[in-house]
Image (cartoon, helix red, strand yellow):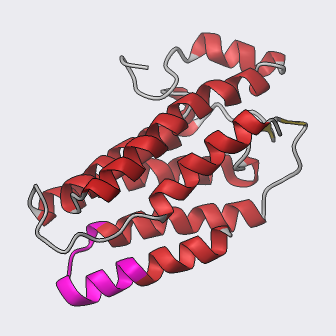
Amino acid sequence: MIVALFTLLAVRLGTDFAETGRITGLLLLVSESLVVVLTVFRRSAAWIDRSWRARLLTGVSMIGPLAVRPAPHAGLAPELLTAAVSAVGLSVIVIGKLSLGRSFGLMPANRGIVSTGVYRFVRHPIYAGYLVTHAAFVFAHATSWNILLLVSADLALLVRAVVEERTLSLDDEYVAYQQRVRWRVLPGVF
């Protein structure tokens, strides 16, 4: 299902780029391609939360970005600005995902505690990057559909961070990490 949704997203965003030259959508596509690759090569989990709540949060947070559509009109902000903001968010996402490496996974699980790199600043930097990238995408492709999808996905993402931490807190190393790194997703906010 992930591969099918990703393929549809790639076709939609690739077609939009070919027709309009807007690159903000392509930046989102780069980020989502890493999800597919890292999921295939992830390591086994010591603990995994397979509850319906975790499954629902994971599904909503993943499907929303994969179901966005390019807007048929100009964005709310200049393309150069939305692409730049999206590139910043994408950089955080890519650095976070590469830092996790084989510890990356979709369901809340402990595949090894990572506390270096961007993980020294917030405990869920990938989610922070998604919030930035999604905001840029909405400003570039403002439709009711995209806003509904990405707000829903991002709210699920924030709750998912809390659920993930319950699973990770079974490990004393993660509890110590939580004490060292105060912020969950956004420094000074959450």
The answer to which quarter of the image holds residue 139 is bottom left
| Residue 108 shows up from this direction | no
The quarter of the rendered structure image containing the C terminus is: top left
Q: x%, y% of residue 183?
A: 49, 19
> Toward the viewer: 80 or 106?
106
Q: x%, y% of residue 78?
A: 8, 61
Please name the residue shown 36% across and 72% down the image: 26
Q: Residue 16, relative to residue 88: is it above or below?
A: below
> Toward the viewer: 96 or 47?
47
Q: x%, y% of residue 115?
A: 64, 31
Q: x%, y% of residue 188?
A: 36, 17
Q: Residue 181, relative to residue 73: is it above or below?
A: above
> Toward the viewer: 163 or 30?
163
Please name the residue shown 69% across and 30% down the image: 164
Asked if residue 116 lies left or right of residue 151, the reply is right
Residue 18 included in the magenta stretch of the image: yes
Please name the residue shown 46% across and 74% down the image: 9
Asked if residue 70 lies left or right of residue 177, the reply is left
| Residue 101 shows up from this direction | yes
Residues rendered magenta in the picture: 12-24
Q: Residue 25, relative to residue 109: is it above or below?
A: below
Please name the residue shown 63% across and 16% down the image: 178
Q: What secondary structure predominates along the stretch shown in magenta?
A: helix
